[in-house]
Structures are given as C-alpha cells and as structure tokens.
Image (cartoon, helix red, strand yellow):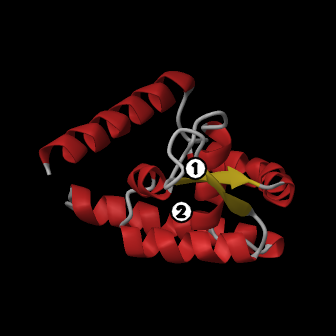
Amino acid sequence: KNRRLPPLLRSCWIKLNTTFQKRLLPFGITPDQYTALRWIYERCGEETNQVTLAALMFTDANNISGLLSRMVKSGLIKRMVSSSDHRMKYLKITPAGLKKFNATRPVALSLEEEVLAGLNTADKETFLHLLNRLSSDLHHSV
C-alpha cells in the first residue's frame, strides 16, 4: 500500500489513544485528563494557566475549559489565584490528582515502551527527533 502521512498519523493516533483510554479506564481518568495532570505536574513551580495548558495540549479554549471543570469537580486539580496578578488563575495539582498521576504514569510509560519496542535505541531517538521536528515545523507554519 502507498499510504501517506495524514492517514498514517491518524491511524497511529487513533490506535494509541484508544489503547491508552482502555488502560486508563480502571483508574477513572481519560487520556486528556492524564495529559493535563502530566503538564501541570511537569511545570510544577510555574504558574500554568488555562491558556498555557490549552497551547501545550494543542486544543482550544472551549475544550480545555470543559476538561478543567470536570477535573476540578473530581478533585484532581484546583484553580489558584496568581501571586503576580490577582485577576489571573493558575492550575495546581491536588494530592488526589498527584496520587492519580503517580498511579497512571507507569501505564503511560509502559504503553510508550510497547509502541516503540520494535525500534532499536538509535531508531527510537531518530523517530522521536523527527516527530518533534515535524510537530514544530507544522506548529510554526500553520
């Protein structure tokens, strides 16, 4: 078959996301919730607001707003008033959110390991480098 980039990326993404969703089901969170927790956790010490998180997750304001509202309601994150601008709110992972993140991180790492298992170390690095470059190029050109 002569498959091109868009269908290949879409096929990979759908399979990866569906598999991740199934593996997260016992933990009661979605892939998007995991990703939000990961970004907030990794940016610990930085005041990550809704706009920043939306950009990091490549989503829009409407999608991120609903996601964050559900996460606040379920006690995974909370909105805090910024110390530098009292009109601005930033996101903070709660102890329950941190516990959920720590419980699900091995699931995410295991899935990544499985997906990349067919590649040797050099190929993995090359693949991730090229994918990152493609993402960056697309982000800056569109």
Quarter of the rendering occupied by the N terminus: bottom left
Q: Which residue is mark 1?
A: 115
Are there few (<14), some (14-19), or many (20+) residues within 10 Å of tag 2? some
Outermost residue to the top? 122
Q: Which labelled disc corresponds to residue 16?
A: 2
- Residue at 51% x, 68% y is 15
Residue 115 in the image, given as x and y percentages of width and height: 58, 49
Q: Is residue 56 left or right of residue 67?
A: left
Distance Cα–Cα, label 1 vs label 2: 8 Å
Could you say which quadrant of the image residue 2 lies in? bottom left
Outermost residue to the left? 141
- Secondary structure under badge 1? helix
Q: Amino acid at mark 2?
A: Leu
Residue 24 in the image, given as x and y percentages of width and height: 73, 68
Q: Is residue 112 left or right of residue 24?
A: left
Q: Amino acid at mark 1?
A: Val
Q: Earlier in the sequence, mark 1 or mark 2?
A: 2
- Residue at 38% x, 29% y is 129
Are there few (<14), some (14-19), or many (20+) residues within 10 Å of tag 1? few
In depth, the one of 73 and 142 nearer the eye is: 73
Q: Are marks 1 and 2 in contact (CB under 8 Å)?
A: yes
* Disc nearest the viewer among 1 and 2: 2
Specify whether residue 22 is in view.
Answer: no
- Residue at 51% x, 52% y is 49
Specify whether residue 100 is in view.
Answer: yes
Q: Which labelled disc corresponds to residue 58?
A: none
Could you say which quadrant of the image residue 37 lies in? bottom right
- Secondary structure under badge 2? helix
- Residue at 41% x, 34% y is 127
Residue 99 in the image, given as x and y percentages of width and height: 86, 54
